[in-house]
Amino acid sequence: MAALSRAEAEERAPQPLTVDLAEVGVRALNAELHAPTASSYEVLNPHGAHSLAVGVHDEIDVRVRGHAGYFCAGMNQLGRIVVDGSAGNGVAENMMSGSVRVRGDASQAAGATGRGGLLVVEGRASMRCGISMKGIDIVVGGDIGAMGAFMAQAGRLVVCGDAGDGLGDSIYEARLYVRGRTGTLGADCVEKPVRDEHLAELRELLTAAGLDHDPTEFRRFGSARGLYHFTTEHSGSY
Amino acid sequence: MKDPAERGLRESATFDRATIAAIQHAARTGVYDIRGWGAKRAVPHFDDLLVLGASMSRYPLEGYRERCDTDVVLGDRHATRPLHLDIPVTIAGMSFGALSAQAKEALGRGASEVGTSTTTGDGGMTDEERGESKTLVYQLLPSRYGMDPDHLRAADAIEVVLGQGAKPGGGGMLLGQKISDRVAEMRTLPPGIDQRSACRHPDWTGPDDLTIKIGELREITDWEKPIYVKVGATRTYYDVKLAVAAGADVVVVDGMQGGTAATQEVFIEHVGIPILAAIPQAAQALRELGVHRKVQLIVSGGIRTGADVAKALALGADAVAIGTAALIALGDNDPKYAEEYEALGSGAGYYDDFQDGRDPAGITTQDPELAARLDPVEAGHRLANYLRVLTMEAQTLARACGKAHVQHLEPEDLVALTVESAAMARVPLAGTSWIPGAGR
């Protein structure tokens, strides 16, 4: 049997359950999402509220129709969350799995400490994007601010625009890809050669993010692993 | 060889032998000293306070006959499931990584045996400690190593750690020799590297952001769990006010004597203030906000005896937390390992190299053979014994002051032996009505 077209699938899919934050509070929204009675949700009138759709731990779809405040989709597990607007500090912080897509820009610390899943920011991301990331994949359509991937431990950060100063400071084993310009690199962060396996994972990440950039346009950055052990001879490096 | 003093030699008070040895070590190795334990210098402490037992003007309770309760409720300000502990002595946060899995299990067993809580640490929650801890507090630290929303939901309370007494303003440290494969996996780090924890939280800055962060944690856990905020004792009055304003259910203040698994010696000995000076500041902040005994205060840093517990409660704490003392109760610095401590260049009673992973007692190590020396059941029982003694000692002093609950102890039950301790603890110098600095 032929697969349904997207239009047909959307037509047949049950209507999302609407939660209007002009009528109920964030507590009611999150309580519903933690024990979902539907598989798909539409959140109206978010008006930059904090902690929207945090702690989701089911395979549900959540669409936030507007701007979100701090920590939207924080600690997401399995959920597929879309913000039709911009997101404040710490969007998808400590995400474990699932996906989060921000149609607009993201403020500081996007994807902070994330351990899994995919965060896509279609616009730009501010400072400390991917700080302390621990396995999450982050794809940013535009630029990122300073100190991106600070102390990044694992996972992959793809920046389709420019990266600000201090990229990858004190980085561990995360892999960073930047298509545009980079400012100064952080302590122990170095440019590394792009090999076939890197082009393959970039292609995979860009496809997942819905972006069609040529992977060969990106440069790769990672850890020189020079600061993995303490010695006072490194005192000038920090 | 004759004692140098008997030969008329004078040791410099400024450059004493330990100082000379430290300079020589720095010159020889180019490395500053990193160690465990807490501050070893003498600072004003609970020993500088005395309890005023009842006589004519106060009415004591009969020891062994009349009740003196010790239970405490923590976190009933906002949480729908506050903690109910049988005793006001809790176990402070110590990580798996810093401690062996056996030690973490023993802490859980000991605490559970007497109805109190234990706490995770930098590195996440292990099955051993969750399984053996009836009441477990889960720490949210700047590093977020192993942070897992399933563990948040499995915890009984959440402690947002801003700092600790041994190193306020500093991050954690775990040297490569303790980053075993299991520790590395939990922390998402390569095995064997020297691990540097962040000193600031990655996704929020300042008290206004903390308010929002606490809101997120409450939302994730459906407002069930008490939220603690832990600070190292420095500007305690302001920190406590800000923590309360940010929405904390419980504030934890850790004095400079509080222990660590590994930090620079210069940090341990020179940053922060004694817990004696911090408690009155914290209590003042809570009273001024009208939330004393409503937002509970847990204090730590050098708690050793039931007298320390009683004095801390009298100064305004609701409960105390112990770390170093708990490890000693498990078996740390046990004289039976004297020869092995000496072989490591230390001695039983002096051993503080928790960072190097070679602890003969099997507590501050990830070496499987050393860790296997610690029987979690026996060690847990020793800890439970010790906790019972602390509690009974505190009850003894509370009854002597005529209190039917240890929390009824108050500053009026204390006097100070020194001008410094009187000023810090804000109780009168013994035999006088003088509280230095009062009213300023």
Image (tube, grey):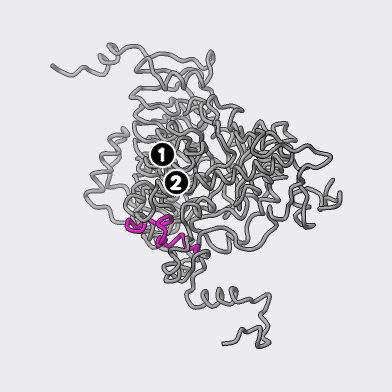
Q: CA distance from mark 2 to mark 1?
A: 10 Å
- Spot occupied by residue B216 in the image (x, y as percentages of width and height): 51, 31
Q: Callout 1: residue from which chain?
A: B
Q: Nearer the viewer, residue B82 or B114?
A: B114
Dots 2, 1 in contact, CB < 8 A: yes
Secondary structure, mark 1, is helix
* Kind of residue at badge 1: Glu
- Spot occupied by residue B308 in the image (x, y as percentages of width and height): 65, 49
Image quadrant assignment for residue B249: top right
Tell me: residue B335, above or below residue B251.
below
- Spot occupied by residue B184 in the image (x, y as percentages of width and height): 35, 51
Name the front one of labels 2 and 1.
2
- Spot occupied by residue B390 in the image (x, y as percentages of width and height): 59, 46
Q: Range of the magenta residues?
A: B351-370
The stretch drawn in magenta includes residue B133: no
* Kind of residue at badge 2: Gly
Q: Which residue is mark 1?
A: B132
- Is A217 placed left or right of B285 in the picture? left
Q: Which residue is mark 2?
A: B380
The stretch drawn in magenta includes residue B362: yes
Secondary structure, mark 2, is helix
Q: Nearer the viewer, residue A162 or B158?
A: B158
- Residue A238 visible: yes
Q: Nearer the viewer, residue B50 or B324?
A: B50
Quarter of the picture containing the N terminus of chain B is bottom right
What residue is drawn where x is 53% and y is 13%? A23
Q: State whether the magenta stretch is mostly helix, strand or loop.
A: loop
What residue is drawn where x is 66% and y is 50%? B275
- Residue A185 visible: no
Extreme-right residue of the structure = B433
